[in-house]
Image: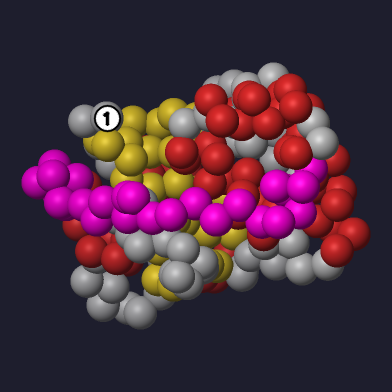
Amino acid sequence: MAAKTPDDYYEGLERWADELRALRAIITSTELTEEIKWGGPCYTVDGKHVVGVGGFKSYFGLWFHQGALLKDEKRVLINAQQGKTRALRQWRMHAPADIKPQIIKRYLKEAIALAREGKEIKPARGKAIIIPPELKDALSTNKRAAAAFKKLRPGLKREYADYVAEAKRVDTEARRIDKILPMIAQGAGLKDKYR
């Protein structure tokens, strides 16, 4: 279940708990406001997303929403979804020793300044939505889902199309279609529970 407050998130950690709490302490020592977005902590300034934290199987770290604009003097930032994300950059850490408070604070200070200046890389808009043939076929046999899909805004249609298209195996693709058809029929977005 997604955390409702930052405290819920940090109290419920099992993996990387100490490391993520250390990152939280560094971030909350700045002027950033702590919120929950997409099921995890997000830190904002003047309502603009600056940085988030998270733990994964083999690493924990930060993601800077406009990280592509940062100088990245220490060369720690990566684009984890090459070809998909334009602005977001991750700083992956694998051990407590990777947490460098002074360096992190410098990156945070620069990210805050960029946000205050209104500097940002906007997402590409108007790109055609390519509906995978398998999803088209499934929608053609489910009239309720097809009608609801037509009413979805383009961003939600793209989420569903990409979710199916990114499946690497046929059985994964079929499972994903089975999972999303009821969601589409309800007019829900794929990631609504994280919004």
Magenta: main secondary structure equals loop
Look at 15% across and 51% down and name the residue there: 119
Q: Which residues are magenta?
A: 113-138
Q: Tell me which colouring the rendered structure shows.
A: secondary structure
Amino acid type of the residue that numbered disc 1 sits on in the rendered structure: Gly
Among the 4 quarters of the image, the one containing residue 171: bottom right
The picture places residue 51, in percent across and down from the top left corner, at 38, 48
Please identify the quadrant where the N terminus is shown.
top right
Q: Where 92 sits versus 164, above or below? A: below
> Residue 69, relative to residue 109: is it above or below?
below
- For label 1, the SS is loop
Residue 97 lies within the magenta run: no
Q: Position of residue 180 (x, y in %)?
A: 75, 37
Residue at the spot x=32%, y=45% of the render?
50
Outermost residue to the right: 171
Write the residue at 53% across / 37% down: 156
| Residue at figure coordinates x 27%, y 30% from the top left | 47
Tell me, yes or no, whether the highlighted magenta stretch contains residue 129. Answer: yes
Q: Front-most of 111 and 104?
A: 111
Residue 55 visible from this viewpoint:
no
Q: Hey, which quadrant is residue 186 in on the image? A: top right
Seen from the viewer's position, the closer of residues 69 and 44 is: 69
Of 145 and 29, nearer the camera is 145
Q: Which residue is mark 1?
A: 47
Using residue 165 as the reference point, say whether residue 125 is left or right of it. Answer: left
Q: Position of residue 191 (x, y in %)?
A: 60, 35
> In this rendering, would 105 be left or right of 154?
left
* Mark 1 crowdedness (10 Å alpha carbons): few <14, some 14-19, many ≥20: few
Q: Is residue 172 left or right of residue 56?
A: right
Place of residue 115 in the rendered image (x, y in percent of width and height, measured from the top left): 19, 45
Q: Is residue 119 visible?
A: yes
Q: Nearer the viewer, residue 16 or 110?
A: 110
